[in-house]
Image (cartoon, grey):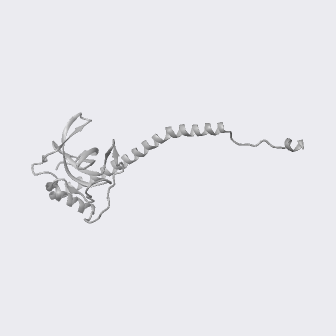
Amino acid sequence: MGGIFMNKKKQKGFTLIELIVVIAIIGVLAAILVPSMIGYVKKSKRTADVANAKQIHTDIVSLLLENDEARSSFYDPNGSGSGGITMHDAQLDSDYQLVLTMRIDGGPGVSTHNYNWVGVRNETQDAAAAFNTRLGYASGQNDIKVPIRLVEQDGQKLNQWMIGYRKNSPDTIEIWVGSANQPLICLYTQKSSKK
């Protein structure tokens, strides 16, 4: 009978300590990698938004160069813009007035849905209509044409694209994202040809 117990083979497997060590290593790696991956995702969304902003800029500049009526509607008659929002240019370390002209919804969480470009003021409605025609945006379409990929920045919702120009330099057209007609992030700015 003693021989039965002697033939028992030693079982192979992981001990509890080994499993705990492996789980701890996986936890440390996850703690390091997850924030990095989130950062990469945000950066890729921002890159996509900048590419869309460049395309919007190209399209609006092209329209303004080709269509005198749209240009007249985009700028006020004396070319200086009415009103304006005080913004800060970090590169020049100076403030300037941004005159918003058009906006379109680009994300969730807006109270009214503007799936076509609309004028921010009555004077800019004709420019917005010409821009919609140029882009082939038909009224009645209810889908977001140019989605904003990065939908939140520092706790603020980003759900509208906005086009504007600098009051003291109307040939500097800027593309912004923001919310409720409040520009929050300038994604693209560049001087266009003289108007």
- Residue 110 sits in which quadrant? bottom left
Which residue is at 15% across, 58% downward? Answer: 69
Point out residue 82 in the picture as x, y percentages from the top left corner.
Answer: 12, 47
Q: Quadrant of the N terminus?
A: top right
User: Residue at the top extreme?
Assistant: 93
Compared to residue 78, the image places residue 137 above or below, namely below
Point out residue 6 in the picture as x, y percentages from the top left corner.
Answer: 86, 41
Point out residue 26 in the picture as x, y percentages from the top left corner.
Answer: 56, 40
Q: Is residue 53 left or right of residue 128?
A: right
**Which residue is nearer to you in this view: 171 or 111?**
111
Total number of numbered discs in the rendering: 0
**Which residue is nearer to you in this view: 171 or 113?**
113
Which residue is at 20% across, 60% downward? Answer: 130
User: Residue at the left extreme?
Assistant: 78
- Residue 111 sits in which quadrant? bottom left
Which residue is at 31% across, 48% downward? Answer: 158
Point out residue 154 in the picture as x, y percentages from the top left corner.
Answer: 33, 41
